[in-house]
Image: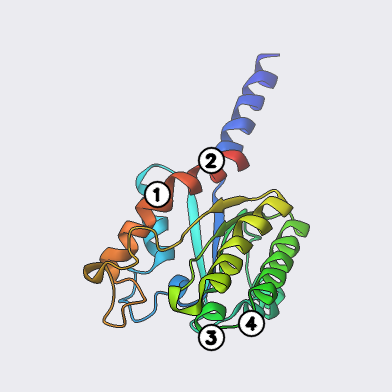
Amino acid sequence: MMLGVGALFMSQAAMAAKPLTVLAYGDSLMAGYQLPPGTGFAPQLEKTLKAKGRAVTVVGAGVSGDTSTQGKARLNWVLAGMKTKPDLVILELGANDMLRGQSPATARANIDGIVKAFKAKGVRVMIAGMRASPNLGAAYVREFEALYPAVAKANGVALYPFFLDGVAAQPKLQLADGMHPNPKGVTVMVQRILPAVERELDAIR
């Protein structure tokens, strides 16, 4: 009987220690645009989580310039190329749709489709939202910014409202283009989103 209990405890410990895989899926904000190796979002998030004692691998799957349409189109190809199915995806898309003035309705449909595709494969999803530039007009801003909470609510997934929280409009935390984070900016982003990511990882455990 004692051997059985011991085996059970060992099995539980093994499950608890099983490394989790997080997929950082998005555009240039996930790709580490113009940043030195190891300073982008995925490597900084992995380093921070490991420093907190979590057995986690964060895989970067950001492509600079991707719209939500392009992000949706490459989804199956990305998953097919992964050695391990991700346990959690942080989904960040839509910024390029907005910068090009493309339809928020199209972005909403694409992001909804991506969320559903991940969920169908048993992957937990957290949406990282984006804000729209005021010069696009109040009506566009309202429709665009509303798509993220709407998709999250419809699919029952977590929402991190603004991926660039703490970095937007902060020149010292941005590259010269005024849009992308520099390494210090990424550090701020990681610290801001960390509690939400840890909640999702705990839910998986």
Report helix, strand or loop for mark 3. Answer: loop
**Residue 100's mark?**
3
Rendered view: 136 above or below 45:
below
Q: Is residue 205 visible?
A: no
Q: Residues within 10 Å of mark 1 (few under 14, many from 20)?
A: few
The quarter of the image holding the N terminus is: top right
Nearer-N-terminus badge (2/4): 2
> Where's the C terminus, which quadrant?
top right
Residue type (three-letter) at the residue carrying disc 1: Lys
Q: Which residue is mark 1?
A: 50
How far is the residue under mark 2 from the one under mark 4?
Answer: 35 Å
CA gap, disc 3 and disc 4: 14 Å
In the rendered image, the vertical position of residue 114 relative to residue 7, given as above or below: below
Residue 86 position, x and y percent, is 62, 58
Q: Residues within 10 Å of mark 3 (few under 14, many from 20)?
A: few
Mark 2 to mark 1 CA distance (whole Å) = 12 Å
Residue plotted at (53% across, 61% down): 129
* Front position among marks 2 and 4: 4
**Alpha-carbon neighbours of circle 2 within 10 Å: few (<14), some, or many (≥20)?**
few
Q: Residue furthest left?
A: 172
- Can you identify the residue that label 2 sits on? 17
The x, y position of residue 146, in whole percent, is 60, 61
Snapshot quadrant of residue 117: bottom right
Disc 4 target residue: 70
